Amino acid sequence: MYRFLKLILFLVFFGCKESPQNQSVKINIPSEVKTPNLLFGIDLNQYTIKTQKIKWGDTFGKILEDNGIDYPEVYKILQEIKGRVNIRKLATGKPYSLFFLNDSIPIPEYFVYHPDPKAYTLVHLKDSLYGDVIKKPIKKIEFEVSGTIKSSLYETMKNIGVNEEITYHLSDIYAWTIDFFRLQKGDRFKVVYTEKFVDDSISIGVDRVKAACFEHKGKTLYAFEYVTNPKKGIVDYFDENAKSLRRAFLRGPLKFNRITSRFNLRRKISYYGNRIRPHKGTDFAASVGTPILATANGTVIKSRYSRGNGNYVTIKHNNIYSTQYLHMKRRKVKVGQFIKQGDIIGWVGMTGNTSGPHVCYRFWKNGRQVDPFKQKLPDAKPISNDLIAKYSKHIVPYKIKLDCIKFDDNSMSEIAENKSIPYAKNSS
């Protein structure tokens, strides 16, 4: 018994000890390690942030001086970042943030100007001075949506929680096959599209519609996206039989076309004593700043200002057709530039002789101004024979995907399972 007790005592005192060669090194690990909480690449665990909006009269220098940085240091910062970033023009009402290091003198270490969700300007204000424009990574997510028309397409999209931009995409794709101002209650649609996000939750717009199916007046109309000219980046939409859904020309130069004055060679105006004043264009009303679209592929032959037309652009499409767009607020294109159908060429304004914001759309055929709505306009170029087989193979998975989407009025009313995405069901 005595020997047994001695053995136990020996194990208690010496059994857990290790030889110097085998002794492990113990590392003290903090019980709580804070996960970095990044905003604009800066860890908020280490900094206090103050976000405000640019006020009238604010400048980069004034903001820094108001926050404890003296002018000699401001001048030094400006010289160091000169040519790297431009922070001399700060737009009134746009946000900026100052980052102050915790437990230090309350002088900012970072200035971040972030008027655009896609990018921001960051300036380091201490020690190693630098400035940089940082573009945020863009994530594209594919969605599937379906809906049934109860009023307008726009209201339907809004009610089911889908980005309303899809309305404009569909109205463009089906411009020559569906009159979206005469949709019938009970018409239905399915769409497969991608949307762009930054910071996982901020949408910066619909990227593209890959496929769509619209049931209108009892007829099913498929549309599939296909790149017909990779070099020029020309994308078109075709049905399941490889027939183009487009014409060579869009119906009008705006996303949604509301005509206020038609082509009329015998128009009478009371202001001029009811004398005949021919109107050789078609007026489309829209608010100032609305994008104006080229109605067909072509080359810009005029981009200038005149007293009557204001800012205007003329596009030659081929030896037969030309179009012109008047009263722009600002022009976006230059003479000699090749333009694709649907490209933005300027913005609606009130320049020249006009009483309100609109775009006057003029149309020439064989050198003579005509009413585009009374012309038998050519179809868009059909898909080439060597691409038909590739196209037919390309659309198979998208047609299967569309056919598998169920029509459900409430399918979009709930927030997606991915909580960072505010609407639509993620199909990826």
Image (cartoon, grey):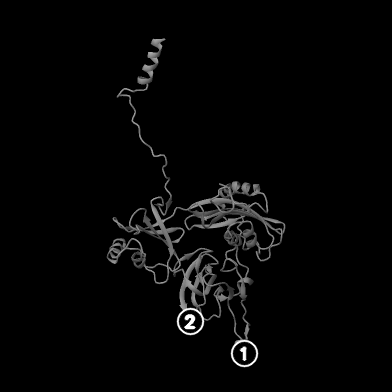
Q: Please tell me the numbered disc located at residue 108.
A: none
- Asked whether the residues under the numbered discs 2 and 1 touch, taking CB atoms below 8 Å apart as contact, a structural biologist would say no
User: Residue 282's x, y, as percent?
Assistant: 59, 75
Q: Is residue 27 above or below residue 181?
A: above
Q: Residue at x 61, y 77 (%)?
A: 263
**Residue 226 in the figure: left or right of residue 105:** right
User: In this view of the protein, which residue sits in the foreground, 203 or 66?
Assistant: 66
User: Residue 244's x, y, as percent?
Assistant: 60, 58
Residue type pointed to by label 1 = Gly
**Residue 43 in the figure: left or right of residue 342:** left
Kindly report the distance in space between the C-alpha atoms of the residues bearing marks 2 and 1: 23 Å
Q: Residues within 10 Å of mark 2 (few under 14, many from 20)?
A: few
Q: Is residue 142 above or below residue 272?
A: above
User: Residue 316's x, y, as percent?
Assistant: 50, 69
| Residue 386 visible in image | no
Local SS, label 2: loop
The residue indicated by pointer 1 is 273
Local SS, label 1: loop
User: In this view of the protein, which residue sits in the foreground, 363 or 128?
Assistant: 128
The mark that comes first in sequence, 2 or 1, is 1
Q: Which image quarter holds the N terminus?
A: top left
User: Residue 63's x, y, as percent?
Assistant: 37, 66
Q: Residue at x 30, y 62 (%)?
A: 77
Q: Please tell me the numbered disc located at residue 307.
A: 2
| Residue 257 visible in image | yes
Residue type pointed to by label 2 = Arg
